Every structure is written in structure tokens, then in C-alpha cells.
Image (spheres, rainbow, N blue to C red):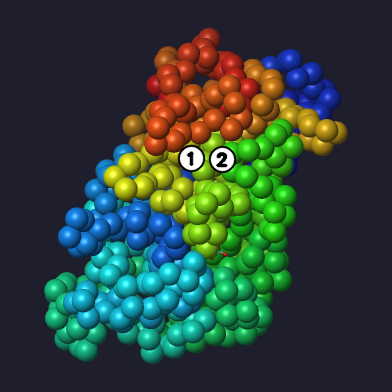
Amino acid sequence: MARRLSVLLFLLLAGLLMVSPTQAQETEPLRGAINADQGETTISRHIYGHFAEHLGEDIYGGFWIQDDQNNWQYNQQVIDALNQLNIPNVRWPGGCFADYYHWKDGIGPRDERPDQVNTIWGAVTEDNSFGTHEFMGLVDRLDAEPIIVGNVGSGTVEEMNDWWKYLNHEGPGPMADLRAENGREEPWGVEYFGVGNESWGCGGQMRPQYYADLYRRFAEYLRPQVGTDPYRIAAGPNGDDYEWMRTLMEEAGYMIDGIDLHHYTIVGTWENKGSATDFAEDGWFEAMQGSHYMDELLTRHSTIMDQYDPEKETSLIVGEWGMWHDPMPGTNPGFLKQQNTLRDALVAALHLNIFNQHADRVRMANLAQTVNVLQALVLYDDGQLVKTPTYHIFDMYKAHQDATLLPMAFDQGVYEHNGEETPAVSASASQDEEGRIHVTLANTDPNQSRTVTTELRGQDVSSVTGRVLTAEQMNAHNTFEQPERLTPSSFDGAQLDGNTLTIELPAKSVVSLELR
Ligand code: AHR
């Protein structure tokens, strides 16, 4: 997005500024324009999607908890919190766990389901009390679409095909009959189905050509059922593995509805990612710079997809994204539990702006993960729930769901740290069905506020309201003891003068605006 916006800016404002963004005085307003009458692309609500794996305390101890008599039940506190976000989908059961999972272990009477060991995550007992019916009950309570990821790595075509029929075949037939025996007469009508997860890694260590052939074989048996057309999702590349993308598009593209790219933002190295809460400006800067790399990944992968699919029929999905820190001290390292600060909030805001800007190709994304794991929306422990800063970003951005992306161009400015640069301001804009315009902006610079002056073209507006998320400290975060330390507040730093909108963005802040 940074590159695209800079080019557009140059064309748009060359006559006005006569300098490149890097030469512009940081104290000068960053100028731009939004073309409110030129929106064409819908920002799919599925960009605002989530991910729940059998990992740590995401399902067990997160969504699914035990009462005093050790009976499993849904966690209503978590469901109530998430329901405020209009979450569009949940991806399940993994992640790496998906290629270990045998779905028939998770159906039927709970006390007859076998215990397993979750060998990939924490070596804890998986009692299979949360299975297909429980997941479908969860998405029903969340009013979200299910995304189910099948097992290619250690499963068979028959097993996946049986699951597909169990979910979707109206019967009569063995899988529909089994579903009815287990209490569900009607098929669920699950459309989104992943054919393996990270098949280049924990999903089977495959090479792209081999996976492309396997994809074709497995996907062939995900056939339309009465009332349900499959939306078949291929395991996509690991970050910048462009060869994986090219091979998939060339060999199997005609059978793929979505390709699931995964990329995490880490600070430092995989071996030493650093603390979620204890970091200095170096760690802040690296996270901001790393987030902008998502724009490069999407641009490059989209270019490859365009070569094979100029009509953009196949979606690029970002099925796992977010910050990955070292685990919270004192927790099982296999549980990937971490705190979540203002830094994570900025990272989420940058990613969502980038996804919005790529809405012509990116039609689904899933933050990893929802409860207690990685960049979680909520942390939950023994009756206590806290909303993370990332939760608040999803709340501030939810108005973009299914709205029309508005073309915008503006000078992003520069945040400079130790001789390195990254864009200071990130933004996206959309218009909803009622004609309201929504603008979200993030100022990554922790030291300096920025003024953005934007001309709104093609529609008259007369009022602007907004919310802001910011704090004094880069590592501000919420805890069970102080759950409201970092929450959005109303924003009075945006002014309209005719159709010119001027926004004073505080240092290290995220702002969402609504214009009418
Ligand atoms: O989200 C944690 C893990 O990260 C997932 O299981 C896997 O797909 C990815 O490598």
C-alpha cells in the first residue's frame, strides 16, 4: 500500500508539493484526497475474520470451559464480547492441529470420544469434547461463517470426503444418517473448506508441485451438495514463497477459490522474538516496518495471481496473521500465550488498512488467534475476561465490513528511527450502504503527532465524529486488574471546513472517523 499510495500521491499532488514524501517537512500537513464517488470494490467482511485452533487455551479454557461439575459448556463471556465485533467467520480446527485432527474422534456421545495427546501444541490431553457439532454451535452463537480446515498431512481423501458429506449432505446416506444419529438432522451448509494447512511445513513438509497434485485430488471430492457450493481453499505460501504461489496457480488454479497465505509479524528472530510488553523503540519500529511488509507480500502475490487469473476470480486469503512474541513468562511455551499492547493495536490497524486497500484480491483474512493465543482479541482466565487493544481496533474498524472501498491518495510521511524509515501514517476509507464515509488512520510515530489534510471529492458531508486509541506508553496494555487502561475514547481532533477534512493524529495512535 505504501508504494501504491506514494505513486498515486505523486501523480495527484506533484504540482502542489514538488517534493517526494521523504523530502517533505514533517511539520507540514500531509495532504491527500478521497474520491467518494469512485468506489468500486467491496471490502469483504471476511477480511475481519478470526481463527480458533486446538492450541493452548483458545478452545479449551477459552471458548469451551468446564462448570463446577466438570461439564463442558460454551463460555458466554467470550461469546458476548465477540458478538460486539460482528465477527464474520472463524477458522477451525487449525493451524497445524488440522493436519493431526481426525474429525470422527470428535463426534458422538462425549464420554465415548477418545482421548488423544495434542502432540503439536503443548503435549496436553485432547479429550475431543469440542468437535464438529460444538464448533458449529459456536459459530451459530457468534453469527459467523464456519471455515473448516481438513486434514491432508496425515489424513485420507476418504476421511475428508466423509467430513464434507457429514457437514453438507442432506441424505439419505451414511454420513447424513450418522449426523442425524448425533442429533443434527439438517445439513449445516458449510461452504469454506481448507484443503490442508501450511502443507509446506507442519502440514506435511511438501514441495509445491506435490501439494498442487494432492490439492487437485482432495479438492475433487469436495463436490457441490444440494444447497451448498464448496469454496475450496488451498494451503498457500509461507510469506514470500512466490514459487509456491506460481506453482499452485499454474497447476491447480482452475480448482481453487482461495489461496491461504500465512505471515506473522515478529520482532527479532524466530528463536528470540522478545517480550510482548517489555520493549524499547527499536522493538516498536521493527513491528511497524514489519507490518508494512504485508503490503509488499500482497502486491507481489497478487501480481502472480493476475498472470493466471486476470479476472481475479481466485481470492488471496491471509489465513494467519498477527504479532508473535515470546510466550508469557510462566506459561506452557506450547500454548503461545502472550500479552497485547498498544504496539499490537497499531500492527492490527496497519494490517487492516492494507487488507482494505487490497480488497480487489484479498477477500478473507484471519487474525491469529481469538482467545488467549498469540495476538488475541480477549484474554480469559477462570471467570475473568479482558479485551485487548487489538479487540478495540477490530471494534473501531468494523464499519468497513462489506462497505465500498474509496480510492484515496495521500502523503504518508516518514517515521525515522536510527537512520531507517517507514511510513508514518496509514489509512483506508470506505462508504457504507447508508452513504456514511468511514476513514481509519494510524500514526506509527511514537514521538510526533501528524496533521493530515484530506480533500473529500464527490460527496458533500457536514459532520465528522470519531474515536481514538492511544496511550502515553508504547507498551500500555489491559490486565484483569486494570481492564480499561487502554480503551478508545471520543476524538475531537478532526475538523471539517467545507469538504476539507483536517485530522490531528496524536503520536502512536489509531483514529476511526465517520463522516455524514
Ligand atoms: O497460529 C499458530 C501456528 O502458526 C499455526 O498452527 C500454524 O498454521 C502456524 O505456523
Q: Residue at x 43, y 21 (%)?
A: 489
Taking 170 as reference, is 402 above or below it?
Answer: above
Taking 265 as reference, is 489 above or below it?
Answer: above
* Quadrant of the snapshot with the N terminus: top right
Q: Quadrant of residue 132?
A: bottom left
Q: Residue at x 40, y 57 (%)?
A: 58
Q: Which mark is residue 344?
A: 2
User: x, y (%) of residue 478?
Assistant: 46, 34
Cα distance, mark 2 to mark 1?
Answer: 6 Å
Where ligand 1 lies, by image quadrant?
Answer: bottom right
Q: Residue at x 49, y 24 (%)?
A: 468
Query: Do labels 2 and 1 touch, CB within 8 Å?
Result: yes
- Callout 2, which amino acid? Asp
User: x, y (%) of residue 111?
Assistant: 21, 76
* Quadrant of the snapshot with the C terminus: top left
- Callout 1, which amino acid? Thr
As drawn, which residue projects farthest toward the top?
497
> Mark 1 — residue?
390
Per the image, label 1 sits on a secondary structure element best described as helix
Residue 261 left/right relative to 152: right
User: x, y (%) of residue 6?
Assistant: 73, 36
Residue 56 left/right relative to 504: left
